[in-house]
Amino acid sequence: MFRGIDILPESISDLQQRLSDQHYVADRGLATALFLALRLKRPLFLEGEAGVGKTALAAAAASALGTDLIRLQCYEGLDIGHAVYEWDYPRQLLELRILDATHTLDRASAHRELYSEPFLIRRPLLQAIDPARARPAVLLIDEIDRADEEFEGFLLELLAEFQITIPELGTLRATVPPLVILTSNRTREIHDALKRRCLYQWIDYPSFDKELAIVRARAPEASARLAEQVTAMVQELRRADLYKVPGVSETIDWVTALVALDRQSLDPETVDETLGVVLKAREDLALVRGRQAADMLERATVRSTPRA
Amino acid sequence: MESAPFPIVSKLLTFGRALRRTGVDVHPGRLLDVVEALGHVNVGSRDEVYHTCRALLVHRHEQLALFDRAFDAFWRGPGRDDGRPRRDGTREVEIETFALQELRDDFTGGESNNAGSREDGLPTWSDLGVLAT
């Protein structure tokens, strides 16, 4: 069990409820995997298309557990200097000039001083394993599929030991290891060695009911009819052959935009005017806007109309 | 591993073998993780057992459907199984059926299974020692 999280969820239902209090709708499978990640102290590996709520889960989990979220966004070329730590070179140089000017420069002590904690820039991974941390953080390693494979190897080591060696300072080891959540959009396969260390969870686009629940939770000011229509409409859009399929956050953005425009329901004109909120690629807009959007709206409206 | 042999371990090993035959690469060490994980969930709930096994034994999206089929067949209650090998795509998969009730008994100290003397050649506790090393 995690020391420091004194409000560790008692059961899967308890965790599910706490996530729901953070307006995150987690199904049983996801809640079970997260619950076990906490109990077994294993990383949670979330895979799925962009926009299904992988990153949002990490944020909701941190709030639900009353702890910090530390996020490492991965990208091609991500290195130790940006992921773990870096020496603050300009500050070291400045300090060196001061020492020089005040004639207090003694080589051994200068080296000791310049490579001490005040000159250390702590990047996300170091922040997460900081021995001074009393509560375990939630460490989100976002879009690991974008990082290079060498970085994956480094991460595998880090996740086994939760320690980092800085040559000038020694080895820093987490007093309380973080809850690690990794996400991947599957732009490439992640090594099985890394995945095997984790609890695996695939997150799909939500069903209509689930997405409606998310929309109602995140945009409570929208009318029931608007929420239902927009949700059904996005579900229709996901069936179309799009270049960039809208995620759940697009659904929420669309509803929120329509509320700001004071709309109570969707009509073909409103769809055409505001479709840009939900379709981000120009090709997709050109494809859907007009005739196809009107057809979709018709199907969506039938679907969202409560059966009398 | 000093505890008394748990029939559940033998069942999980069999389940792991069934999964391997369907093409899901199951490392024996992961089955021990499942045993540990099951201690944290309600093993009386099929749903919780399912999600626990799935989160630990599957780590590829493509394998989820295979896993679902194997789990379904494996943990199905008695009476629904015709005892014949099942067909899974091109492979023939023999899946042994155990009732969830037995799993529950293992944890609640109910009637124990004769895990050490199976006649069907299923892996038993003594085999586990070999696998765990």
Image (cartoon, helix red, strand yellow):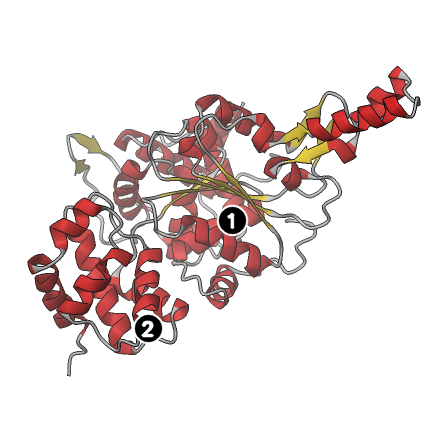
Residue at x-position 24% and y-position 62%: A274
Q: How many marks?
A: 2
Looking at the rendered structure, the kind of residue marked 1 is Leu
Name the residue beneath numbered marker 1: A36
Residue at x-position 60% and y-position 27%: A81
**Front-lying residue, B67 or A159:** A159
Mark 2 element type: helix
Q: Is residue A121 above or below residue A48?
A: above
- The percent position of residue A268, horizontal first and vertical second, equals 13, 68
- The percent position of residue A99, horizontal first and vertical second, equals 87, 25
Sequence-first tag of 2 and 1: 1
Look at the numbered discs 2 and 1 and tell me whether their residues touch, using CB distance below 8 Å. Answer: no
Name the residue beneath numbered marker 2: A259
Q: Is residue A2 above or below residue A64?
A: above
Furthest residue toward bottom = A308
Q: In the shown orientation, is residue A259 left or right of residue B93?
A: right
Furthest residue toward top = A107
* The quadrant where residue A206 appears: bottom left
Looking at the rendered structure, the kind of residue marked 2 is Val
Q: In the shown orientation, is residue A43 left or right of residue A230?
A: right
**Front-lying residue, A110 or A147:** A110
